Each structure stands twice: as C-alpha cells, then as structure tokens.
Image (cartoon, helix red, strand yellow):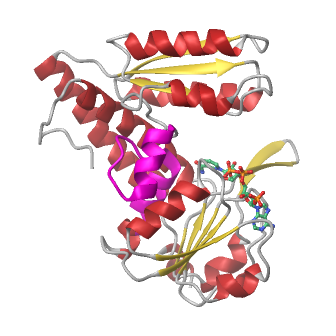
Amino acid sequence: LGDKINKKIINGKKIAKDIKKNVGKGVLILAEKYKIFPRLDMILIGDNSESTLYTRAKRKYAKKLGIKSKIHRLPADISEKQVLGLIDELNDAPDTHGILVQLPLSQHISAQKVIDTIDPKKDVDGFTVYNMGNIFLGYKPYFYPCTPQGVIYLLKSVLGGDLSGLDVIMVGRSNIVGKPLSYMMINENMTVTVTHSYTKNLNELCREKDVIVSAVGNPGMIKADWVKEGAVCIDIGIKRRDIGDKVHLVGDFDYEEVIKKAGFITPVPGGVGPMTIAMLLLNTLKAALILNDINDQDIMVY
Ligand code: NDP
C-alpha cells in the first residue's frame, strides 16, 4: 500500500528542479552567445519578516542559476510617488529584465497602481492589467503569473498535455492565484467552477469534480469525503504551524486522509511551492529574451 500511495504524490520539487536546470542552461547560452545576463530587481517595502524571507529565497535560487538579482529595500513609510519613481527607473534600465514588487504592501500605497506601473514586458509576476487582461481574453500574455503557471504545468505532467473537458473546482478567487488560474484553466478547455468564502455546499461541489485546486490558506479544510475517488488534488494553500519548536507548513487538504482517495495529490511542502519559484526564474529568462527580441530554439522557455 505504501508504494501505491507514493505513486500518487506529485513531486513538485523534482519537476521544478528539472525546469530550473533548463533555465540555468538557457542563462548560460544567453551569456555565451549574446552577452546578455538576465537580471531580476525586487522591491521590498518595510520589514515584514515573511516578505523578507521570500525575497531572499528568490535571490538565492536566482543566483544558483546565474540570474543576477537585487533587492531594493525601502522603508515602510516611503511614499507611493517614490515607489513609482523607482519602478520608472527600473523600467528604463537596460540591464533590468524582471521587476517584482513583493506583496502585500502597506495601506498607504496602492498595490494596483504600483504593479500597473511595471512595464508588462518586465512584469515577471504576471500581475499587470496588460498580462492579466490577455489571459482573461484568451490571448497570450508576455507572462503568466507564477503559481497558476506552475499548477497548469503540474496538471499537464500528470494528466497529459490535453486537459480539455475535465471538470475542475477552483477554491479561492484571489487576484494573484484563484482568478488568473481559473481563466487559464478555461483557456485549457476545462469546465471551471470558481468558489470562495460565500459559496454554498462547497463539499458537495468538490465531490463531483475530476480536479480540485485549492488556494485558501485554511489548513486541512478539504476533507476526504469531499473528494471523488481518483480525483487530482492540487494544494496551493500554505499556512505556518508551530509544532513544538519546529515550524511546519500545512496545506488546505486533509492530506493524510485525502491521499487514500485521490488519484494524484501535491504535498505541502514540496508540491506547488517549488514550482512557483521555478516559474519566476523561467519568466526572468523569458523577459531577457523578449526585451532583446531573441527567439532561440536552444533556449527552453516552455
Ligand atoms: P487570499 O487570502 O487573497 O484568498 C483566499 C481565497 O480563499 C479568497 O478568495 C477567499 O474567499 C477564499 N476562502 C476563504 N475561506 C474560504 C472558505 N471557507 N471556503 C472557500 N473559499 C474560501 O489568498 P491567496 O490567494 O493569496 O493565497 C491563498 C493561499 O495560497 C495562502 O495560504 C497562500 O499562502 C498560498 N499561496 C501559495 C503559493 C505557493 O507558491 N504555493 C503562492 C501564493 C499563495 P473571498 O474572496 O470570498 O474572501
């Protein structure tokens, strides 16, 4: 039984590793053939410890692949105008390929305004209205947001390239995960039910679906009896739990029980999380190609 269970686990860490390896190769080719060095600029406002951790992790992984990066640390009380000024500078900087603003932002700064000041060709998080709007219309954006892009990749890796006709439920409708992913799944010809905190009978809706994708942040919310036998379960939710003196990361699914029924399931950690970082690095490489009008078959951008 142990082996049977193991085969159900979608190893996001391993899949992400393969993608990162290809990104690393692409970075090398860009440097050797074109003398271009992909660079990611991150804007971190204030001293939120999680945001600091996330930007440092992104910097660490970028470095491993030869992608240059810089964290612009700005004080919590910086004005919106100054942030917009920095983004304008980075938009014009020829050496900067990717620009990322670490969310959340404090109340006095409009996240929408800040993000939408980023040049869509440098918007490696895929959050600008331009990139989101293209997804909504079923056109190709410059960049897909990283977590949704990682989820589509995982779904294709277990279900094959064609997702047409599958019934999927998206739990969560945030602008950075649930909404763009819902539209990306529609664009894959899946039949998508989008749900949120006002949805009635969520358990019954889940039970009918071939695929359940959850991005809530409510540990263990999705129980085994919400899951159809053989369903694919994608867990985006992450919550930190202090157990003893250790910090554990837990997802939205009641993992130990759900895995017995699921056809495939992503673990937390080691499922969607590593894919998000891999997609950011991939998007940064892609930005360097787009900005320099390079279309090179030796460089894989998927
Ligand atoms: P948000 O808080 O912005 O959105 C959460 C969504 O869940 C909302 O749409 C909310 O509904 C919905 N929701 C809340 N309670 C329920 C409920 N009981 N039933 C159904 N829906 C509910 O979070 P994010 O989208 O930013 O992130 C979601 C989770 O994913 C978090 O745990 C986050 O840490 C994680 N995450 C993980 C990433 C990764 O790489 N693995 C990347 C990004 C996020 P409503 O709109 O009505 O409020």
Q: The N terminus lies in which quarter of the figure?
A: bottom right
Residue at 72 percent of width and 28 percent of height: 105
Magenta segment, prevailing SS (helix, strand or loop): helix
Give x and y (percent) for residue 302. Answer: 27, 50
Front in this rendered view, residue 15 or 293: 293
252 left or right, relative to 166? right
57 left or right, relative to 75? left
Which span is picked out in magenta? 128-155
Residue at 80 percent of width and 69 percent of height: 198
Front in this rendered view, residue 85 or 57: 85
Give x and y (percent) for residue 266. Answer: 56, 65
Asked whether residue 102 is in view, the answer is no
Q: Is residue 233 above or below residue 173?
A: below
Residue at 46 percent of width and 48 percent of height: 133
Please say whether residue 137 is one of the residues in the magenta stretch.
yes
Front in this rendered view, residue 33 or 3: 33
- Ligand 1 is found in the corner quadrant, namely bottom right
Give x and y (percent) for residue 21. Answer: 31, 41
Q: Is residue 112 above or below residue 4?
A: above
